[in-house]
Image: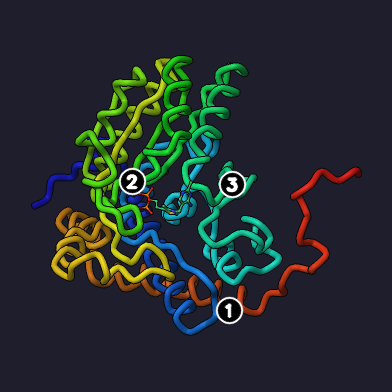
Amino acid sequence: MANNRHKDLGLSDQEVLDMYETMLLARRIDERMWLLNRSGKIPFVISCQGQEAAQVGAAYALDRQKDYLLPYYRDLGAVLSFGMTPKDIMLSGFAKAEDPNSGGRQMPGHFGQKKNRIVTGSSPVTTQVPHAVGIALAAKMEGSDLVALVTFGEGSSNQGDFHEGANFAGVHKLPVIFLCENNKLAISVPIEKQLACEKVSDRAAGYGMPGITINGNDPLEVYQAVKEAANRCRRGEGPVLIETMCNRLTAHSSDDDDRTYRSSEELEKAKSEDPVLLFASYLKENGLLDDELEKEMNDRIMNQVNEATDYAEEAPYALPEDALKHVYHEEQ
Ligand SMILES: Cc1ncc(C[n+]2csc(CCOP(=O)(O)OP(=O)(O)O)c2C)c(N)n1
């Protein structure tokens, strides 16, 4: 049923089509990564599949020329929205020297790109949270109205880093948005064995900030929540915790077999909530997308994915002597 909800949010038809194309691009890159992994060409994949709506909806609600993104490993949709390219992602998958994330020295999913204000993270989960709070503190001290968006899984919200960062941000009213992508699994551990409270957003009260739980399969709902949170941050009123409920449609990573802890019924239910398919339906119901345009978009995306794959596969590896580059301070 047509309802044009995006117009009420101030989003143009073109903007929602762009959001959809970014979600689809993330999905297609991710699917290619799995094929490359299973054919022995790349060592590791950690997927965004099922979380694209939360990632793209949140990123589009920010000022992508000014705000900072501190993503976690599933955030392919968010980093593409902030300007990373399929080529950048593939160079990281193949661990090549030109990889902007780390020169091929970090695992895939460790996103970082200075020119797009995507701040690199570490493998221990949740370390990005205190980093985001630090950036928000710097923004406040400098009188800038930029916002830091930090994302993490619900399992990561049990780490000390989350609580320390959230408390500091709450006390000092810092412009940081805590976005939890709750896919209800931390590797094999289900949500009921992770949290003693019902929702991750319940924790916000302890840190003096608003906390909300929303549908992470709907990019428009996420857009609205993050936009309102960003406006609040820019007014100097402090942080917000947003919990987006979504699904992980793949195993935890290419080194995991989720059949050992997730039933096929559970997976089927998750697939029935696929955000890429749901958003395509919304666009079709509102007359913005038809089969022809969808095919045109998909062809355009597949050309990019193919070009990026070929480029990265052919690209040279880093030199052995560069292994410690940027690890230790070097005298100029
Ligand atoms: C401090 C730390 N503990 C454990 C791990 C191993 N580990 C990697 S991902 C992960 C699960 C995190 O779950 P969640 O935060 O819910 O994110 P999801 O993978 O479900 O998106 C764990 C335990 C780690 N990387 N860092």
Mark 2 or 1: the one toward you: 2
Is residue 60 visible in this depiction of the protein? no
As shown in the figure, which amino acid type bears the numbered disc 2? Answer: Glu
The Cα–Cα distance between marks 2 and 1, rounded to whole angstroms, is 32 Å
Q: Residue furthest right?
A: 332
Frontmost residue, 17 versus 90: 90
Describe the element under mark 1 as helix, strand or loop. helix
Q: Is residue 33 above or below residue 71?
A: below
Q: Read off the residue under disc 3.
A: 120
Describe the element under mark 3 as helix, strand or loop. loop
Is residue 85 visible in this depiction of the protein? yes
As shown in the figure, which amino acid type bears the numbered disc 3? Answer: Thr
Frontmost residue, 303 versus 127: 127
The mark nearer the N terminus, 3 or 2, is 3
Describe the element under mark 2 as helix, strand or loop. strand
Residue 210, which numbered label?
none
Q: Read off the residue under disc 2.
A: 181
Tell me whether the residue at label 2 lies in contact with that at label 1, contact meaning CB atoms closer than 8 angstroms.
no
Q: Is mark 2 within 8 Å of ligand 1?
A: yes
The Cα–Cα distance between marks 3 and 2, rounded to whole angstroms, is 18 Å
The quarter in which the C terminus is drawn is: top right
* Residue 285, image x, y percentages: 14, 56
Q: Which residue is depicted at the point 8% across and 52% down?
A: 1
The mark nearer the N terminus, 2 or 1, is 2
Q: Read off the residue under disc 1.
A: 310
